[in-house]
Image: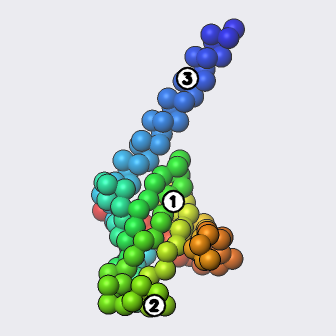
Amino acid sequence: MKKLKSYILFAILIITMVSCVNKKTDLLNTKWVHNFEECKDYFEFKDNLEYNYYSCESDELSYGTYFLVNDTINIEQLAGEFDMNFEANSRHRTPKERYKLLIDEGFIRYLEKWEFKNEKWQKSDFIFDENYTFKKEH
């Protein structure tokens, strides 16, 4: 009986790992876009667990790292393309933030935002627009 339980647990572990690998593979080297009337916001997920995010509104590219757990993308925003133009403590620099995004039915949407304040991570009470979703570009 113990041997059977061990085999079942091992099978569940393998299935979970394969599922995660497939989702990760589906994300690698892809671009996910949110279309506005005249422009697009987008995420680009690279194969080295780095991403780029372009904001149409600010016309700025930010970047950082990501990792995937099941259907949740965990993002850490590290910097923006114009940060070098400002002093280290300038409010104009891209803030260090973390986000949780959900891959759901072919779309990515935001779940949570975390801000780095007073040398610790704090969950933000920011509420994301449920229509602000990103679709994989082919």
Q: Position of residue 120 (x, y in %)?
A: 62, 69
Give x and y (percent) for residue 103.
Answer: 51, 58
Under tag 1, what secondary structure?
strand
Mark found first going from the N terminus, 3 or 1? 3
Q: Could you tell me which quadrant the C terminus lies in?
A: bottom left
Q: Mark 3 or mark 2, which has the lower sequence index? A: 3
Relative image position of residue 77 (x, y in whole percent): 45, 71
Residue at 41% across, 48% down: 24
**Distance from Cα at disc 3 to Cα at disc 2:** 51 Å
- Disc sitting over residue 90 in the figure: 2
Q: Which residue is mark 3?
A: 10
Task: Count residues near mark 3 (Cα–Cα under 10 Å), then give few for <14, some for 14-19, many for 20+.
Answer: few
At mark 2, the secondary structure is: loop
Q: Residues within 10 Å of mark 2 (few under 14, many from 20)?
A: few
Give me the C-alpha separation between circle 3 and circle 1: 26 Å
Q: How many marks?
A: 3
Q: Please name whichever residue, 44 or 134, is drawn nearer the observer in this view of the structure.
A: 44
Q: Is residue 29 left or right of residue 73?
A: left
Amino acid type of the residue that numbered disc 3 sits on in the rendered structure: Phe
Looking at the image, residue 101 lies above or below residue 132: above
Q: Disc 1 and disc 2: Cα gap in Å? A: 26 Å
Q: Amino acid at mark 1?
A: Asn
